[in-house]
Amino acid sequence: MGVQAILEHGNFGLGTLPTWTAKWSPSTGRVYQIQGSGRVAEAARDADAPFAVVTWFKPETEVSIAPVGSFSDLEARCDEFRRSGDIFSAPRLGWHFKRVSTRAVNPPRPGTRFVDAAKAQSESTFADIDGSLVGLFRNSA
């Protein structure tokens, strides 16, 4: 299935593009690739997407929170705003990041199993950048 077809089913989610060289998030109706090189670019609408999970994002809560120092701090702050015991929640945070790290699977050899390919990931760090952080969290309750 292609990126355009997936966007017809939701505007928020996560997925992969061919050869697992990117992760993407259609949180704004646009799909961005985070490549192993650290380069971030908008994906072509006709690009294949072998895996995707999407939903229609409709915010239930809009709040401002104080800066956090770690992912566990952020997770705890998000927990404060969950209103239900649903299995998953989907936060989208617009933020100015002092530092944020990304990672992407490096291009595997043909026929490599995903579990093996995922062991070879590149990490990139960006500093002093505006962006959106999206995620799908399993509720602890």
Image: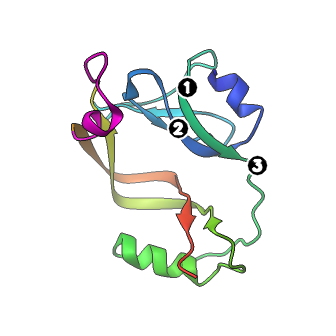
Left or right of residue 79, residue 34 in this image: left
Residue depicted at x 32% and y 44%: 103
- Which amino acid, by three-letter code, is at mark 3? Trp
Classify 10 Å Cα crowding around label 1: few (below 14), some (14-19), many (20 and above).
Answer: many
| N-terminal-most mark, 3 or 2 | 2
Point out the tag, 2 or 1, that comes first from the N-terminus: 2
Judged from the image, the secondary structure of the residue bearing numbered disc 3 is loop
CA neighbours of label 2 inside 10 A, class few (<14), some (14 to 19), many (20+): many
- Residue 67 visible, this angle: no
Determine the residue positioned at 73% across, 53% down.
Answer: 57
In the picture provided, is 95 more to the left or to the right than 5?
left
Tell me the distance, in whole angstroms, between the alpha carbons under discs 1 and 3.
Answer: 18 Å
Q: Magenta segment, which residues?
A: 108-119
Q: Is residue 94 visible?
A: yes
- Majority SS type along the magenta span: loop
Front-most of residues 132 and 52: 52
* Mark 3 and mark 2: Cα distance apart in space: 15 Å
Residue in the picture at 31% in, 35% down: 105
Residue 136 position within the rendered picture, expressed as x and y whole percent measured from the top left: 56, 58
Where residue 93 appears, as percent x and y from the top left, is 57, 62
Q: Are marks 2 and 1 in contact (CB under 8 Å)?
A: yes
Three-letter amino acid code at the position of disc 2: Gly
Assess whether residue 118 is covered by the magenta stretch. yes
Residue highlighted by disc 3:
56
On the image, numbered disc 1 is attached to which residue? Answer: 49
**Which quadrant of the figure has residue 35?**
top left
Q: Is disc 2 placed on a helix, strand or loop? A: strand
Residue 15's disc number: 2
Q: Position of residue 27 (x, y in %)?
A: 63, 46
